[in-house]
Amino acid sequence: MASVDINLTAGKSHVGEPWIWRLSREFNVKLTIKKANIDGDFGWMQIELDGPVEEVQRATAWLMTTGLHVEALSRAVGA
């Protein structure tokens, strides 16, 4: 199992998109929203993804293709 903390930042053109919904539907990861501040023009969110290493990697790679600014804060891999 793996865990990663990620900061997501979205500009006006990306704020209204259902990124979290897609993460929860398309990837076998547990998603926890740790902090967030979102309005009509700008948003940021700190999330934690937990799950199989391959799924966490796939989810993180997908986030990087969305146009959001993605910054991994910490990673942990458990047995």
Image (cartoon, rainbow, N blue to C red):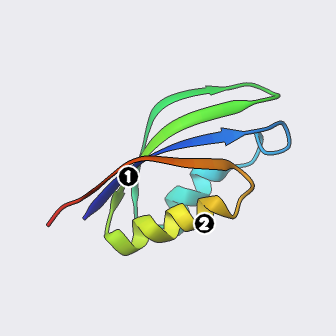
- Secondary structure of the residue carrying numbered label 1: strand
User: Residue 74 vs residue 44: left or right?
Assistant: left
Disc nearer the start of the sequence (1/2): 1
Q: Position of residue 45 (x, y in %)?
A: 56, 35
Q: Residue placed at 59% from the left, 52% from the top?
A: 21
User: Considering the image in quadrants, where does the N terminus appear?
Assistant: bottom left
Question: Callout 2: few (<14), some (14-19), or many (20+) C-alpha neighbours within 10 Å?
Answer: few
Q: Residue furthest right?
A: 13
The picture places residue 20, in percent across and down from the top left corner, at 58, 49
Residue at image point 55% right, 58% down: 23
Q: Residues within 10 Å of mark 1 (few under 14, many from 20)?
A: many
Relative image position of residue 43 (x, y in whole percent) = 69, 31
From the viewer's perspective, tell me whether residue 31 is left or right of residue 79.
right
In the image, is 77 to the left or to the right of 61? left
State the image coordinates of residue 18 (x, y, percent, origin top left).
68, 49
Amino acid type at circle 2 is Trp
Q: Which residue is mark 1?
A: 4
Q: Nearer the viewer, residue 11 or 74?
A: 74
Q: Which mark is residue 62?
A: 2
Residue extending farthest bottom: 54
The residue drawn where x is 32% and y is 62% is: 51
What's the mark number on residue 40?
none
Residue at left offset 51%, top offset 64%: 59
Three-letter amino acid code of the residue under disc 1? Val
In what quadrant of the picture does the C terminus appear? bottom left
Q: What's the CA distance linking mark 1 and mark 2?
A: 14 Å
**Outermost residue, left side:** 79
Q: Is residue 17 above or below residue 36?
A: below
Q: Secondary structure at mark 2?
A: helix
- Residue 53 drawn above or below residue 68: below
